[in-house]
Image (cartoon, rainbow, N blue to C red):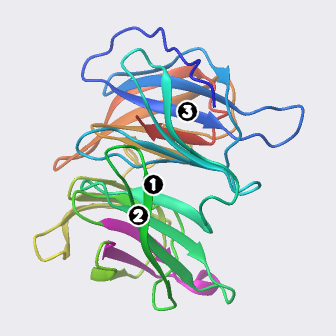
Amino acid sequence: MSGLLRSGLRVLPITNRLFLYSVRLYPIQPARAAVATIGPYGFEAGTFSFLGDWTLVASAATAKRKWLLFHDSRTGAAATGWVDRSSLLQTVRHYPPGAIDFPFRMAAVDGRGNLMLLGFGTRGEALLGFAQVLDDGTFVEWWRTLRPDLLLPHGPIAGLKESHAWFSNDRNNAPGSTVSILDVKRGQILGQRRWGARIRWMVGEGDLLFFFFDDSLRTTELCVVDASYRIVTLKRTELDFATYTDGFNRIASSPGAHLLYSWETYNAPGAIRVLGRDGFRLTAQLNGIDWRWHYFVPC
């Protein structure tokens, strides 16, 4: 893995950085990566480089460093690293094929640096793992177990302040959904809530969750996860045309700014929204962006 990434970006107020990565799908289409800046009022990606060969890129951030975790399901290779102040990717640990057993397809980190790993057993049940990246960059999986009791996610897993959250829509297109809150370190479901409608998207940050329901009323709902891990509604809005849009099909989250876009489009529009107790506010509209990236990972 080379460290030839530079951003060359203009400074935006209250910015975070995102590591953008596009998986190699065909021999003539190599993997590529870039570092972007994002804030409430703008998003800009730097020049891209051809970099590595990974099928999973995830944040493994801790209080001390914004670690990145890489894995290639085709070869079994893995790595950890971080992006320095010059927007250069620094690889710290590289694991050759066979060095670690990583049968997981999803990884999400919470505010404590705890990684929730999710794969599937031979019967399609959830394979749950708990891992961390240590201060020296070492990847450690503490345990894994089959959990047939877990409802499988139908969207990305959100890493909250002290837990993980995801939604599961009912089978056979039935009009219902469940949101689960998990303490992955203990492997314990802390709370769940049922809705009578299917969920289209979910956004999480801190202790807040925002839902787009897949109904004819374009319903949205803002919730907070309280100290008892109950999912409590703060605001529910029907006919929420100001927030609910059909123009985008993906949401990439970073602290303080959430990116709405349409995957696999080029020179296309996007938007930035900020999640708070007043709702999911639009703060910027974007134009002419290349959205042909598989991963947008805080770094």
Q: Is residue 168 above or below residue 113?
A: below
Residue lying at 48% horizontally and 46% vertically, measured from the top left: 251
Question: Would residue 111 be found to the left or right of residue 250 on screen?
Answer: left
Which mark, residue 131?
Answer: 2
Q: Which residues are magenta?
A: 164-184
Q: Is residue 47 above or below residue 246?
A: above
Relative image position of residue 289 (x, y in whole percent): 59, 23
Q: Residue furthest left?
A: 227
Which mark, residue 20?
Answer: 3
Query: In whole angstroms, how far apart are the C-alphas of marks 3 and 2?
Result: 23 Å
**Residues at marks 1 and 2 touching, judged by CB atoms closer than 8 Å:** yes
* Element marked by disc 2: strand
Label 3 crowding class (10 Å Cα cut-off): few <14, some 14-19, many 20+? many
Say which of marks 3 and 1 sits in front.
1
* Quarter occupied by residue 285: top left
Say which of marks 1 and 2 sits in front.
1
Task: Based on the picture, tell me whether residue 56 belongs to the magenta stretch.
Answer: no
Which mark, residue 139?
Answer: 1
Question: Would residue 159 be found to the left or right of residue 24 on screen?
Answer: left
Relative image position of residue 15 (x, y in whole percent): 30, 24
* Element marked by disc 3: strand
* Quarter occupied by residue 208: bottom left
Query: In whole angstroms, how far apart are the C-alphas of marks 1 and 2?
Result: 7 Å
Residue lying at 45% horizontally and 19% vertically, measured from the top left: 87
Tell me the kind of residue under disc 2: Ala
